[in-house]
Amino acid sequence: MAILRGTAAGREGPLKGVTVELKDERFQTVYSAVSGADGGFALEAPEGRYPFLTAVRDYGEKYLEYWAQNVPVRDGEALRVRIDALEVYGLHAFTVKGAANALLVYFRPMSLCRFQAGEGDIAPELKEENIEVEVDGQRSRVYVCDRVREYAGGAGFLTAYLIQVSVPGRAGDWRRVDLTVRDREGAFGCAALFR
């Protein structure tokens, strides 16, 4: 067994009572922990990689979820979970052969305000200045931010974003991407992707 440690926080600081869950490929919870008064959590699970990790408290009322994908659980690994009224879902990163030494990052942001208002497309409007990316712990520059219309089956069409960001070394060597988005009202959403 190994312990994945971390902290959970919101806009005002550390958050108690955030449920942090490791999930399998069917999104079923396999291990979980709850953050304490200082926002800290310690999630015990067999060492390895897990397809998904979510963290949430008061879902759909005050907060949306934090997501991480391909999460390594091993002693010494730590996560900084931050939740607010935005959510970043479906985070993916990839390179294009023969293109610039950069990383393309795809994600679908969601807004609690738009969800509560019953809007069909709940994505916030984002521009380069609303997006922060870290690749392997180093701040990246957002070169391009393109809005994408994504077909979502019975749900119709949703808004996603495709951005191109700088990388600290060779684009194909990245190990972790952390993404934070902010709307005009200051709400934020965060996600992480491990390789």
Image (cartoon, grey):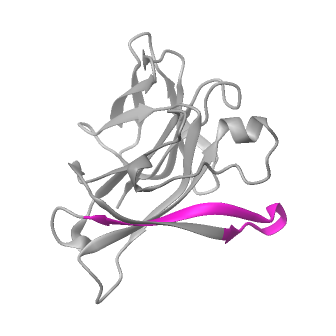
Say above or below: 157 vs 34: below
Q: What stretch is highlighted in magenta?
A: 150-166
> Where in the figure is residue 17, as x and y percent of width and height?
54, 17
Foreground residue among 124 and 46: 124
Q: What is the chief secondary structure element of the magenta stretch?
A: strand
Say above or below: 103 vs 33: below
> Where in the figure is residue 176, as x and y percent of width and height?
31, 55
User: Would you say residue 191 is visible in this rendering?
Assistant: yes
User: Would you say residue 49 is visible in this rendering?
Assistant: no
Quarter of the image containing the C terminus? bottom left
Q: Judge whether residue 70 is colored magenta.
A: no
Which residue is situated farthest in the top direction here? 37
Residue name at image x 47 percent, y 18 percent = 15
> Where in the figure is residue 133, as x and y percent of width and height?
34, 52
> Where in the figure is residue 134, as x and y percent of width and height?
29, 51
Residue name at image x 60 percent, y 48 percent = 124
Residue name at image x 53 percent, y 41 percent = 183
